[in-house]
Image (cartoon, rainbow, N blue to C red):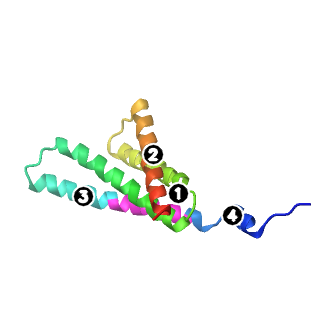
Amino acid sequence: MNYRPVSNQLFHQPRSSTWLFSLMGIILALLFSLGMILLIALLLYLTALPERMAFYLVYAVSIAAILWGSAYAARRIGSRGWLHGGIIGVIYVLLMLGGGLIIVADLAIGWNLVVKIFLGFIFGAVGGMWGVNQ
C-alpha cells in the first residue's frame, strides 16, 4: 500500500516560481552592483581616494550584492535557502567574470577562479539562510 500524506506530496512538488524568484534575485544583485560600482567610480573621480581602494570596495559591493540577492530570492522561495542562495552566488560570480572578459580579454583559470566561485557559493548560501529565516 503506497500511502503518502498530503503535506509530503506538497513538499516534493517543484514550484515553477522558484526559477522566477532566483532570476529576480540575480537581476537585483547585478543591478545593485552596477549602481554601487558607478557610485564607487564617481567617488574615485571626485575625491582623493587612492585607486587601490577600488579593489576592496568592489569586493565589498559584490559580497553585499550576493547576500542581498540570495536573501531576496530565498525569502520568496521559502525553502532550501542555502541551496538556492549558493546557486545564485555562483551564477552571480560567473556573470561578473563573463562581464569582466568583455573588458579584459584575459582570464587565468586557476585557484583564484575556484576561490571566487567557492566564496560566491558560501556568501550566497549565508544570504539564502538569512532570507529563509527572516
The answer to whether residue 4 is above or below residue 95 is: below
**What numbered label is drawn on residue 122?**
2
Write the start and end of the magenta stretch as one range.
20-32
| Residue at the image position 33 percent from the left and 57 percent from the top | 33
Q: Is residue 21 magenta?
A: yes
Q: Earlier in the sequence, mark 2 or mark 4?
A: 4
Q: Is residue 37 left or right of residue 27?
A: left
Magenta: main secondary structure equals helix
Using the numbered discs, state the Cα–Cα distance from disc 1 to disc 4 in whole angstroms: 15 Å
Instruction: Locate residue 8, reporting x and y percent.
Output: 73, 64
Residue behind mark 1 = 81
Q: Earlier in the sequence, mark 1 or mark 4?
A: 4
Residue 37: name its quadrant: bottom left
Residue behind mark 4 = 11
- Are the residues at dot 2 and dot 1 in contact (C-beta closer than 8 Å)? no
Q: Earlier in the sequence, mark 2 or mark 1?
A: 1
Instruction: Locate residue 131, reporting x and y percent.
Output: 46, 62
Using the numbered discs, state the Cα–Cα distance from disc 3 to disc 2 in whole angstroms: 26 Å
Residue behind mark 3 = 38
Q: Secondary structure at mark 4?
A: helix
**What numbered label is drawn on residue 131?**
none
- Are the residues at dot 4 and dot 3 in contact (C-beta closer than 8 Å)? no
- Are the residues at dot 3 and dot 2 in contact (C-beta closer than 8 Å)? no
Using the numbered discs, state the Cα–Cα distance from disc 2 to disc 4 in whole angstroms: 25 Å
Q: Amino acid at mark 2?
A: Ile
Q: Earlier in the sequence, mark 1 or mark 3?
A: 3
Instruction: Locate residue 62, reporting x and y percent.
Output: 34, 51
Residue 55: name its quadrant: top left
Q: Is residue 112 magenta?
A: no
